[in-house]
Amino acid sequence: MKLSVARSELLDALSVVGKGMSARSTLPILSGILVSASDSQLQLQATDLEISVRRTCAALVEDEGTAVVPGRLLTEIVRNLPEAAVTVETEGDVAHVRCQHSSFTIRTLSAADFPKFPEVVLEKTVSLPSEVIGSVVKRVSRSVSRDETRATLTGILVLVEGPALKMVSTDSYRLAISEVVLEGEPPESLQVVVPGKALDEVTRMMSDSQEMTVGVTENQVVFEFGETTFVTRRIEGNFPNYKQIIPKDSTTAIEIPTDELIAAVKRVSLLALHNSPIKLGVNAEDQTLSLSAMTQDVGDASEDLMVKVEGSNTEIAFNHSFLMDGLSSAGAETIRLEIKDRDKPGLIRSVSEDGFLYVLMPVRTG
């Protein structure tokens, strides 16, 4: 195999497929990138057996062939090369990488041992704007569970219904829902639970200008955008009935600029150490929201904010990290916090056209 490719093109491709490499596998082949050259094209592949990533780019191919090259090493070499043409040539079990006056020799692995890229027949596909997918995933990804014993909760429920795209995630302590109305002709309906980590990786790879095609099979989900194909497993099992978790009514509601509340929560939570909660007290007569936190033998903090209050006086306590996640994910200038009582979940809404809901379980304070 012998080919030449622009350094910037090669680095972009390596950066994308590198997301699919295994970081901790005992199989050396999974820490490699399969490099294939044919028909004026360079194709790179990586997999950790959970996800598989493939990227193609234009190249000047003199001799066709394939080889598996240590992924991280090749990426670091290319990252440090000058902006010029890079030549990759294999000879036996070594690969030579050359660029201007730099030359590297790397041991390769057998391409025959590299897992085959999943070839799937898609049952259903929808095309969605990448920019929209990225913003929706960002709003719900923090609420994905990291507990592998509850596999369904490690995924994000993706729903395409009529003109709307909706994503839902929960770790049983909080629930995030983000919904946007799509422009143009409504796509085909879709419902699938995708691993949260995989969706995070996909959004990091794509550019906002790209259109993304999402396809599903019985046990896999395929994302295609630009010259990249990303395949991940589909999470089986029933996602929780999230509609039952959303509070139906409230006795108190406040509206406040999001940035103002985020700043106050950051300050007060400096004294919420060792998972101490942050307490919220609403005074309807004074139209104020009081934030407070205390850590035994360390100290306490408090802050009062002017807010718009509807309803009666109330108080509630939340995990300050979960509260901050919800506020940061809202993506709106103003949020609305709805409270039933101190023992019922609180509800954060974005006060804008985009639909964002964040349900947060309270912390009992005795």
Image (cartoon, rainbow, N blue to C red):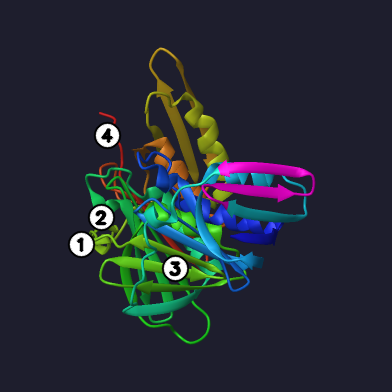
The amino acid type, in three-letter code, at marker 4 is Arg
Magenta part of the chain: 91-106
Q: Is residue 264 left or right of residue 347?
A: right
Inspect the magenta stretch and tell me whether residue 212 lies in it.
Answer: no
Mark 3 vs mark 4, CA separation in Å: 42 Å
* Separation of marks 4 and 2 at Cα, in angstroms: 27 Å
Callouts 2 and 1 close, C-beta under 8 Å: yes
Q: Which residue is mark 4?
A: 364
Marker disc for residue 219: none
- Majority secondary structure in the magenta region: strand
Q: Which mark is residue 238?
A: 1
Nearer the viewer's eye, disc 4 or disc 1? 1
Tell me the SS state at disc 4.
loop
**Is the N terminus in the top left, top right, bottom left or bottom right quadrant?**
bottom right
* Residue at 41 percent of width and 42 percent of height: 28
Relative to 73, residue 84 above or below:
below
CA gap between label 2 and label 1 equals 7 Å
Q: Are marks 4 and 2 in contact (CB under 8 Å)?
A: no
Q: Residues within 10 Å of mark 1 (few under 14, many from 20)?
A: few
Amino acid type shown at disc 2: Thr
